Amino acid sequence: QVELVESGGGLVQAGGSLRLSCAVSGRTVGRYSMGWFRQAPGKEREFVAAIIWSSGNTLYAVSVKGRFTISRDNAKNTVFLQMNSLKPEDTAVYYCAAQSYYSGSYVSTKSYDYWGQGTQVTVSS
């Protein structure tokens, strides 16, 4: 069984930064493609970023590209999401997810097998 635990959310002013962490237990993080998603009130959960386990390549949603960076520390079994230049529209619950095998997409929620409980990020204007 794989367990994902997010941390690092909070309240920040527009233009500020936050660093989210996702601690993975049960399997080695380097063997999974990992994704970050977010869900704002009344909206569907949406893709934010992903890191592919085999190559380390990264993918980003257009809305966060250039501001957010996904990375992983295999030794610590942890995935990070560095968020800079935050905007009020980034306010959401952020979820970490693990994909145990590639099923054709890195951006669909249906492609991920394990999910964390989420961490709230609130950006004030």
Image: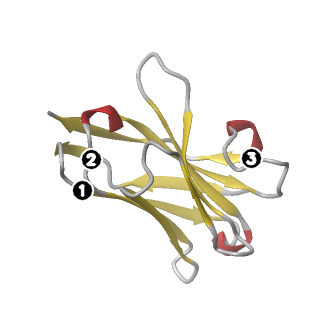
For the residues bearing labels 1 and 3, Cβ distance under 8 angstroms? no
Identify residue type, mark 2.
Answer: Leu
For the residues bearing labels 2 and 1, Cβ distance under 8 angstroms? yes
Q: Give whichever of 28, 73 is nearer the camera.
A: 73
Q: Residues within 10 Å of mark 3 (few under 14, many from 20)?
A: few
Farthest-out residue, bottom = 75
Which residue is depicted at the point 26% across and 40% down?
87
Label 2 sits on residue: 86
Closer to the N terminus: mark 1 or mark 3? 1
Quadrant into which the C terminus falls: top left
Quadrant into which the N terminus falls: bottom right
Residue 87 appears left or right of 59: left
Identify the image quadrant of residue 34.
Answer: bottom right
Real-space Cα separation, disc 2 to disc 1, in angstroms: 6 Å
Label 3 sits on residue: 113
Real-space Cα separation, disc 2 to disc 3, in angstroms: 28 Å
Discs 1/3, front = 1
Which residue is depicted at the point 19% across and 52% down?
16
Q: Which mark is residue 17?
A: 1
Closer to the N terminus: mark 2 or mark 3? 2
> The residue tagged with tag 3: helix, strand or loop?
loop
In the image, residue 63 above or below residue 57:
above
Q: Residues within 10 Å of mark 2 (few under 14, many from 20)?
A: many
> The residue tagged with tag 1: helix, strand or loop?
loop
Residue 12 x/y as whole percent: 18, 45
Residue 20 appears left or right of 87: right
